[in-house]
Image (cartoon, grey):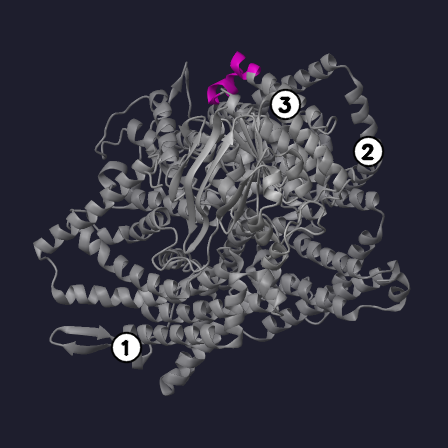
Amino acid sequence: MQSYRIKKINFTDVFMWVVGAALLLLIVVGSFLTLQEEKYTAVQWFDLAVFGLAQGSVYALIALGYTLVYGILRMINFAHSEIFMSGAFIGYFAASSMQKSGFMQENPLLGILITFFVAMTTSTVLAVLLERIAYRPLRGAPRLVPLITAIGASFFLQYVFRGLFGTHNRAYPEIEIIKGTVPISGDFQIQKIQIVVILAAALMMALLVLFVQYTKTGKAMRAVSEDKAVAALMGIDVDKIIVNTFALGAALAGAAGVLYCFMFRIVTFYMGFIPGIKAFTAAVLGGIGNPAGAMLGGLFLGIFESLGPTLFLDGLGIPAPYQLKDVIAFTMLVMVLIFRPTGILGERLSKTKA
Amino acid sequence: MTDILTATGVTKQFGGLTAVNNLSIKIPDQSISSIIGPNGAGKTTFFNCVTGFYTPEMGAIHFRGNRIDGLRSDQVTQMGVSRTYQNIRLFSNLTAIENVMVGYEPHLKTNWLDAVFHTPRYHNDEKAAHEEAIKLIRFVGLTGLGDQIARNLPYGAQRRLEIARALASKPGLLLLDEPTAGMNPNETVEMMHFIRNLRDSFGITIMLIEHDMRLVMGISEQVTVLDFGEKIAEGTPKDIQSNPRVIEAYLGRGAATEGMAAATGKPGKPH
Amino acid sequence: MSSIQQQNTFDWKKTLQIGLIGGAVGVLIAMVGMVEEFNKRDIIAGTLTMGWTILSLTMLVTGLFAARAAASNASSVVGSIVAGTIFGAVMSILVWIVDKYNIRDILVNASPTLVKHLTFEKGIPNGLFMLIGLGAAVGGLGGVIQILPENIRRAISLGLGIAALLGLLQEIIQVSLANFEGASKAVEWMFGKGTEKGLSLAGAILVFVVVAAGNYLWTGNASKISAGFEKLPQSSRKSFRWLGYGLLFLALIYLPVVLGLYLTEVVNVTGLFILMGLGLNIVVGFAGLLDLGYVAFYAVGAYTVGVLTNLSGELTLNLGWNFWLALPIGVALAVLAGVALGVPVLNMRGDYLAIVTLGFGEIIRILALSDFLKPHIGGSQGIVNIPPPGFLDVIIKTPQTLYYLIVAGCLLALFISSRLRDSRLGRSWKALREDEDVAQAMGINLVATKLLAFATGAAFSGLSGSILAIKLGTIYPHSFALLISINVLALIIVGGMGSIPGVFVGALLLAGMPELLREFAEYRLLIYGALLVVMMQVRPEGFWPEATHKRELHAENAEPQAEGGAA
């Protein structure tokens, strides 16, 4: 017998719908006003978009680390942002020493590869140590405990790096072959570094997808994310897979660190915090636990964040809209978690209510 | 006799899986009835629909004439429905008495200000909750264990504590989900008497999900059989025992064609 | 493992492992700069510096762990000595490297000064031999401590700990006791002379002996005393309690007089954290909702008071209101913010809740910093010229006067927290924390319960922020960083989640101590981070746990649910 649903509409739902609608209105009106003013040229929009794509690629790489670990352990590795930072940091030492010795100038390609190698090794080692020391003993603990551990680890790592390496800003050396721009047509051009970032990230993501889909370890990872107990019964060494997952996510984050620093140059101990949160937002946006979602979410967030302030905040007359760039990302996080907690591509893993 | 609970055409789906399919049940007031069926038949899902944990996609559930499907579980409890769980879900780290006191919630009126200023209302509520909790703890046979941490109680005691907690809200309808799981035959018989006593003394309507046929056939006035989310039989225990569809669902086609076979006393639970 | 097997085997591998890990930790401590920085302060005047204390402690713990890994007493001590030696060796290698090669560009603390410190100014190789020797000795000591019976071990540890603590706090103690004539002689004897810091050697030994012996004797008799106390009739127990409260109250009133200006200021800062801690304790500890954006309410309280009372004339609102009028508004707005934050996160759990609330906190901070809102709330320059309020005849400006305001706030929060904890709402929060779905099934309205938690927590934080505004007279957005939220979270966890006395313990340790011991400032968050990680491993219920939490976090140690067996 078909009958109508009693949908109890409560105050809190209304509140959220109003807020959501207001934000949407803000975006639409703001964009309209900005575009109407015709303050920005097509070239400028293009630049912003490409920049957003590049930044989004970095977010995507970091987001993969979050999503892979969440898929396996159902926890947010809060310290992942420091894994990212560690790769960038140690990669810096490699890059700058090669620059000083002249090696980098003579063999730029090799130099870059070595930098990546050093960065990714560092981040992987650190992540594996973290898992072994801090997370593994807490496997069965109530949820709050590993989360607090992760928060503690995050701050610990930040300040250890600060203590070890000091507070002065260091800058990645400028590498000749990736300096400058490549013209496209007319006034449109792309920075070489942006091309490198986008392509490198895309390559790594493709490799990851292949790995997870077709290799034995990759399949084992998927099995463990689905159901740890059953995977163990099938003979999979769950601990080893968990370590592998951490390592994989960390390697990507380390690479992301190098790419990020190619673009933004400055290396500091706190550089991981904001990109970390954005990457997490991206992972949730795409659907936590879903690697494809993380990639998609990263790219989307990067572009939205890059275009956003100029597109809809400027039109509303907000001074210095780029200051509120992060607010856009955080607001997006909140909205996604409220209205579509399973993300764009939906959670691959069913999150049953209790 | 009126029906305290009526479910009409209830359907609950999870993605592509239909857990409960077009289920209609009438539960007479102050009766003891059971829902049985193989594992995965949708019994607990149905309970969850009644208590508001799930909202059915189709159909309606009425309690004492009021529509309850779609309400939140706290609203359903406030209306007089209470339950226990298949895998005991006590507040493990609270004491037994604290557990039962939480169950008394629908009868508490203390608010934030009362609590801060220790108004008469606060004192009355605390006293009433405490007394009721002690009374119920004695009633279920856990006298003296009130200050024990729920997690540390033996299994049987935990089951009884859960029932005490469910009774604290003074429900009109009590849903018991596999109350005798893990119990030996003696304990099962005790539970049988206990359930009957509940109904006789307090006039509570009781619905059971059970696998122990002794219990089911022993105290149920009405038995509903589910398989794959659908009702395949309903009636008195006697009717059910000789229903070939029921036998088939539990024991497979072969057993059904062998003719009458009582589920009672058969070794091993259906899986 | 059978004892027969263990008697003669010596687990070289494990011992080596422990020694290496210990040494690595020691290296880390040195390279992060703690040795140099902490060596500026003496624990025992002229003899033992804080830096060496930390290193020695690490050696001790290394020896302790090595001893634990061994089976027999003999091999325990041997193992601990070996581990300590390895520790010393690892550190020696570090020192040698730092001395030989210039890696200062990379590791900023790899300086000749560090070499000087670590070789006891005796240079290489003599200093290194001493270092290794120290490692062996202290490691061995750790091993010895490990094999001692439990009560002696506890007595010694406590003795050492209290002695170290007193050495650290030498300044406060000297200042406080300076007000009392008779004490000055004792103080002079026990502590360093003149500008020397820390305890004197004699003083240290005395403290150690007194505390250790006292603890040893006490544990034997403690149960007798508390049993005796329990036996007293209810009425006299109650009067004892009231007597205790009365004494405490008197102490509170006279504290600023005793402590003097500087220390009262330290107490004030601690007090503001206690106030915030009591609030977050409700949200995280009682209700189990991990709010990482807690600093937002602090900001709302502070900014509201700042905007409403400031006399700078630079902001759009130039009202110059009275603080006592602005205060309730500040708290009310904080409560509103708490509800506004709570509504969107009602359906979120655990990790998600944490991240989203963190996002909120950051949004508030960025908005406070932005040019967009600058005309109204001051942007990166903040709000200046917030006048101190008056109360009766007094202007609340000095640390002493602020002290009473802050204490009043803390007492209010304490009162409300305790009352709520022992009520329907408190039980609902506990149930919510245990199992949200079942709590709802019991008839608890989750929306109201959660929002009340957020609102109450926000209220306390807003109160704290409001007081901060007039305490400082100016507010900057930089005071409202995530770090504050983490600081408050750390202190309630260290004290014990959900435990009201724990908030006080945590605040004393993580808000009070850093104010006193300035050397720690550089390493504050490093220590907090490490503390959080370590505590979650060994003592997640905190130092003064709330009963329920202690059970929850040691679930593995609970008795198994045997059928028919009694608990």
Would residue B250 be found to the left or right of residue A354 on screen? right
In the image, residue C490 sits, relative to residue C231, either above or below, namely below
Residue C218: mark in rendering: 2
Q: Residue at x 28, y 53 (%)?
A: A325
| Residue C449 makes an appearance in the image | no
Q: Quadrant of the C terminus of chain C?
A: top right
Would residue B7 be found to the left or right of residue B200 on screen? left
Nearer to us: label 1 or label 3? 3
On the same chain, marks 3 and 2? The answer is no
Residue furthest to the left: A37
In the rendered structure, the residue with mark 1 lies on which chain? A
Kindly report the secondary structure that dominates the magenta region of the rendered protein: helix
Q: Quadrant of the N terminus of chain C?
A: bottom right
Residue C128 x, y percent position in the rendering: 71, 68
Residue that carries the numbered disc 3 in the rendered image: B200
Residue kind at label 1, given as amino acid type: Lys
Marks 3/2 in contact by CB < 8 Å: the verdict is no
Residue C354: mark in rendering: none
In the rendered structure, the residue with mark 3 lies on which chain? B
Residue that carries the numbered disc 1 in the rendered image: A179
Based on the picture, tell me whether residue A311 belongs to the magenta stretch. Answer: no
| Residue C172 makes an appearance in the image | yes
Marks 1/3 in contact by CB < 8 Å: the verdict is no
Q: What stretch of residues is rendered in magenta?
A: B111-124
Closest to the observer: B73 or C238? B73
Q: Helix, strand or loop at disc 1? A: loop
Residue A279 x, y percent position in the rendering: 38, 59
Closest to the observer: A4 or C269? A4
Residue kind at label 3, given as amino acid type: Asp
